Every structure is written in structure tokens, then in C-alpha cells.
Amino acid sequence: MDKFVIRGGNPLLGTIKISGAKNSALPCMAAAILTEDEVILENIPQVRDIETERKLLESMGAEVELGYGRAQHRTSIKCAVLSDPVAKYEIVKTMRASSLVLGPLIARTGMARVAMPGGCNIGGRPIDLHIKGLESMGAVITYDHGYLEARSPNDGRSQLKGAHIVFDKITVTGTEDLLMAAALADGESLFENCAREPEVTDLAAMLIAMGAKIEGAGTSTIKITGVSKLHGARHRINPDRIEAGTFLIAGAITGGDLNVDCLNPEHLGSLLSKLQECGVKLEVGKDAIRVRSEGAASLKAADITTEEYPGFPTDMQAQFMALLTQCEGTSNVTENIFENRFMHVGELNRMGANITVAGRTATVRGGTKLQSAAVMCSDLRASAALVLAALVADGESILDRVYHMDRGYERMEEKLRGVGAQIRRMGEVFGKK
Ligand code: UD1
């Protein structure tokens, strides 16, 4: 299993480029199921979850071509024939977002068989809202040996029907899954209490390019008028706001001067205000942000509460907590989205942080000097928090199980090395067995 070896203490200096958003790319790849034509996606990040989705689509009969050389971030997908509309457990168990194929499969083929998902180890993560929504659209759902089977009305022979759905809880992939289903449904759908995340808007833009009729994506009410057929399209994936946020914190925590390039500042509002509250200096450009700080001595505490977009993202909570360990004063971090998302706390404390957890709130007594240690990555964003902590820790840290990181960060160690971090990968090379 790969490990990262990180020697802390170097301020990060220079320019770092942000890749395309994994969480946009995943639903956009699933949307290719909705048409028999070729779909071309640009700015696809080269991360393990994308590789998993490629395998998933291919296992159903899709042709997926990954670009190489200068076109390495382009992918073309053609689902001319979906001979086997099944998302198998061996693939789904490593990535919860596999449930994103559920809606498009039923909409296109009238049936889907999807293994119940696994994914990040951050709580129960049910998909009941996806299922409830599909049932409102006329799907019949049954369960069989760990698999969920869904058929459109009339035993898979008729289209799904448009529906009025009010989500009990805001769900990102739930909104996306049902948006894809509704695009090919018979009649009009009205969704309320939708997720407003930029990834939903990105997917909607792609669906519209494919011929879908969607209004209101990016707001909490979305209206979809179903069409009988969608066609091929070319779509460019948004920059990854979570990768961008992680590197902004890397610049701040190391007392660096970093230009984080190829991002969309509009997607980073809540994070940028919290960084400023901590005393981090930001120069926000059109598609780049320069981040500067004098390091620990200049940083001060701030409270964060995770919320749905445009609130503070749960996917930045762990990384921001790493920063708060270096801020003078006491900060409270409240996690409202997932019930088990403090697994990084124990590892940060092993590195010398002073964090206590009571229910959904972690209290960080900041301004502690971090020490290097051997630590274990437990999920994707927790891993990123440990990298950030190791970048300022005294001495050499070893991070085990960085495969969690490889799920969502493209060549993280190379990008960080390029701006002066002392980080290397030990063990097998990503992509090889
Ligand atoms: C997506 C992101 C993930 C991010 C999360 C919250 C992708 C691939 N992943 O995950 O990185 O952390 O949004 O911003 O885009 N819930 C239910 N029933 C459901 C669905 C969700 O109760 O059917 C609950 C979840 O347990 C959680 C909350 O709703 O407490 C939000 O989850 P959701 O927005 O669905 O997260 P994901 O879409 O899985």
C-alpha cells in the first residue's frame, strides 16, 4: 500500500494548477448513459474514482476512451448498446457515487440492477431519497442479495413519469440522479429543496447541451420537461473547488505565497471569508487566487459550521481543522452533514494538536506546534488534512493508506513538490497492481 513521506517546514511558493472536479465528472460520465451518441468530456481529473466509473460504464457495455498525451484529460463515452445494465458489487463497493448510474439506467433501458453502495467511511450514507424519488416517477424497486433492482412502469416497457418531488433532505447526488432520470421521463417534473452545489449546475449544463429541458439548476427549485431522446455533446468539467480549497489552505498553513490557478473563485465564497477571518491574505482574480500568510504567528481562530452550498462545505472541514490547529485561540468546528466525519481528529492529536469532540462539534485549541508522526488516512478529505498538518510538522511524517487520497486528488504529491513541499510517495505506483 502506498505511503506519503512528508518533511514539514517549507513555505509553499509558486503556482499550482487545479484539475477538473471529480464530483462533477462522476455525474457527467453517468449522464452519457442517457444517449446512444458519443459524449466528450474535457477537464476530467485523473483520479481513482474516475477510473472506477470508467470500469463501471465499460462493464455495462459502454465504450470509454481516455485521452493521452496532451488530451489526457479528455474522455469520450459511447453507450450505443448497454448490454448489461448492472452496477456490480466489486466496482460499486469502492465508490458510493456509483448510485449515480441508477437514474440514467432506468431512464434509458427501463431497468437497473445496482449493488448497494460502499464508499467513504463517513457515516451511514443511505440512498433512500434517490429511491423514493424514482418511485414517485413510477419505478418499481425490489431488493435481491445486496442488489437493488429497479424497473420503469409496465415492467420496464414504459418511460418513467415526471413527478413533483420535495426532497426531505438536501442531497447532492440524489438531486443529480433524479435530474438525469427526469430528463428522459414522460412529462414535467418539479423538484424542490434541491442541492445547489456547482456540481449540480455543471451536470445540468451538460444535460442541456445533450438536449434536455431544465430550468433552475443552482437554485433549490428545478423544473425539468422530459424529452424522448437525448443526443451527444461536448462538455468541459468545472474546476475542483475542494482541491482548490485544499491548496489555498496549504499556502496559508505553511506561511507561503502561492498562486492557485485554474479555479472558479465564485464557488469558494464561504471558504474565502473564513480564511480571511483567520488572517490569511487573499488576492482574488478571475480564475486564480494568490494566498499569502506569515504562518502560525499571524493566524487567528475562527468557528466553522458545515452546511449545504453555499455554506461551508463538509468536504473542506477536515482540511480547515488542520489550519485551525495553527491559529491562535479556540475554534469550534460543527459538522452538520455527516455524522461520522471527525476521524482525522485522533490522528491530528497524535501529531500534537489539541482537539476534543463532543457530539457534532470539535473544539480546536490552536497555536500548538505539530510534530511528525506515522498516521493513517481514513477517508478522502481526512487524508488531505493529514497532508496539510504534515507540511508544517516538525520532522518527517509517514501517511499510510494514501489510496484514499488517490480517489480524489490528481497527482497531489507532484503538485505539492512543484511548489516546494518535501513530499514523496513510497510503495506501488498509482495505476499498477
Ligand atoms: C456528495 C459529494 C460528497 C460531499 C457530499 C455533501 C459526490 C460524488 N459526493 O455526496 O463529496 O461530501 O455531497 O456535500 O458528489 N442522505 C440521506 N438519504 C439519501 C441521500 C443522502 O439521508 O438518499 C443524507 C446523507 O447521509 C447526508 C446528507 O443527506 O447526511 C447529504 O448527503 P448527500 O448530499 O447525498 O451526499 P452525497 O451526494 O453522497
Image: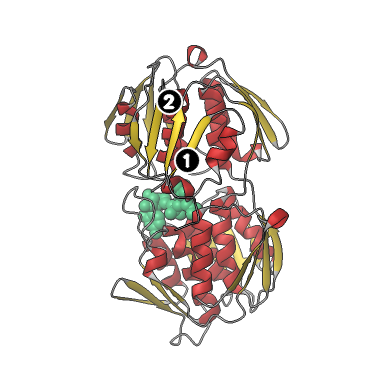
Would residue 376 be found to the left or right of residue 65 on screen?
left
Judging from the image, the colouring scheme is secondary structure
At 38% from the left and 21% from the top, the residue drawn is 370
The relative height of residue 155 versus residue 88 in the rendered view (above or below) is below
Q: In this view, which residue lies farthest toward the top?
A: 297
- Res 152 seen here: yes
Q: Nearer the viewer, mark 1 or mark 2?
A: 1
At 50% from the left and 23% from the top, the residue drawn is 253
Quadrant position of residue 18: top right
Q: Give the mark, 1 or 2, whose residue is nearer the N terminus.
A: 2
Q: Which residue is mark 2?
A: 303
Q: Which residue is mark 1?
A: 425
The relative height of residue 205 versus residue 135 in the rendered view (above or below) is above
At 52% from the left and 43% from the top, the residue drawn is 309
What's the residue type where badge 2 is placed?
Asp
Quadrant position of residue 117: bottom left
